[in-house]
Image (spheres, rainbow, N blue to C red):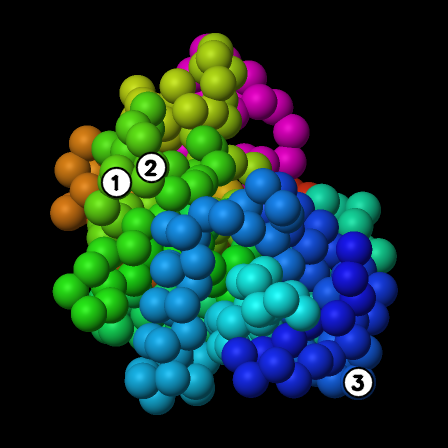
Amino acid sequence: MSNMVYDMQGTGQPLAEELAAGGEGSIYPLLNRPDVVVKKYHQNHIGDAERMEKVNALIALYRENPCLRTLPLAWPQIAVYDSQQRWQGYAMKCVQGKKMRLLCNPKLTKKHFPQLTRVQIVSYLLNLLNTAEQLHKQGIFMGDINLDNFIVDPDSEQVYFIDCDSFQISYQGRRYPCPVGQDSMIPPEHQGLKLKEVVRDENSDLFSLTAICFMLLMSGRHPYEHIGGTSITSNIGTGHFPYGQSIRPGSQGAIPQGPWYAWWSHLSYNLKGAFITTFKDAAGSPSQRVRISELKKLLKQYKWSIEQGRLSNEVWPAQVKESEYRSED
């Protein structure tokens, strides 16, 4: 495989060693510009005209939309070619940090985020939601929202969005869909459908974004994991959210015995209500899901309560909170 890529004018750039690889392609830093990385698609994707057209539309949209250039996005910025000017993929800025998924494993969290607090987790979530809100205002919907598509900076509150080439965009009157997604993060109304034919919108993104918020605050626990369920995707279909109900942990339909009820008890009353609304009450009514603006407000209130010492700042509180604090009502 050639270790060179070229722009449309034929100017070449050598590639450094492979940084990462996935199902679609591999990521390489530029040897002389490590702040820039290239995504080279695997050979079986190179001849995909539809994929190339979408990437070119993403590049054009980025150049024409100044808002996108202010957001923490690893967005396609320039097409790259081989020495024969055959399309290979695109270049984008390199982002530094750790995969968000590491925050969902206590052992890995302690290793990579040794000073982590609940306040910092909430700050990550607020920054994630701010960026998502700005994308929605531009008519851009992420679709494939999962813990592997966000990079967080352990030394700050920054959250970077990666795999932006899967986003659903509209450009010059044409809609380019998001054709992929993790089953456990797909909203109930899209379960079982061909994703390349699905039209994503604010409501569908809201389901997945709220799931991310829940999972980070619950150390990776999925909102639809419960005793007696078959699979997470099946549980999403039934809309059985096991929290905020009078079901004893360990019982049929409840969460297992363990630390999860204690962690849930330390969330603010109104934030818990938002999760119940989106995952239970609005399970079959996408338009009734809690909006990003409301979710941000509740997270800010929760953060304030932690900073005032009224709720725990521990990432994994060991004991169930004795009483509810409802000053946010």
Q: Is residue 18 above or below residue 115?
A: above
Mark earlier in primary sequence (3, 1): 3
Tell me which corner region of the image, top left, top right, bottom left or bottom right, holds residue 86: bottom right
**61 lies left or right of 185:** left
Task: Find out whether the residues at labels 3 and 1 contact each other: C-beta distance under 8 Å.
Answer: no
Marks 2 and 3, how far apart at CA:
38 Å
Determine the CA span between mark 3 and mark 1: 41 Å
- Mark nearest the camera among 2 and 3 is 3
Q: Is residue 144 left or right of residue 285?
A: right
In-image side of 223 versus 64 (left or right)? right
Badge 1 crowding class, 10 Å Cα cut-off, few under 14, some 14 to 19, many 20 or more, is: some
User: Can residue 83 be seen in this snapshot?
Assistant: yes
| Magenta-tinted stretch | 243-263
Number of marks in the rendered image: 3
Residue highlighted by disc 3: 32
In the image, 171 versus 72, the foreground residue is 171
- The relative height of residue 182 versus residue 31 in the rendered view (above or below) is above
Callout 3 secondary element: loop
**172 and 197: which one is in front?**
172
| Label 2 Cα neighbours within 10 Å, binned few <14 / some 14-19 / many ≥20 | some
Dots 1 and 2: beta carbons under 8 Å? yes
Residue located beneath label 1 in the image? 198
Q: Amino acid at mark 2?
A: Leu
- Residue 123 in the image, given as x and y percentages of width and height: 53, 71
Label 1 and label 2: CA atoms lie apart by: 5 Å
Q: Amino acid at mark 1?
A: Val
The crowd level at tag 3 (other Cα within 10 Å; few <14, some 14-19, many 20+) is few
Image point 55% across, 51% down: which residue? Answer: 46
Q: Which residue is mark 2?
A: 195
Specify the amino acid type for callout 3.
Asn
Residue 60, image x, y percentages: 36, 77
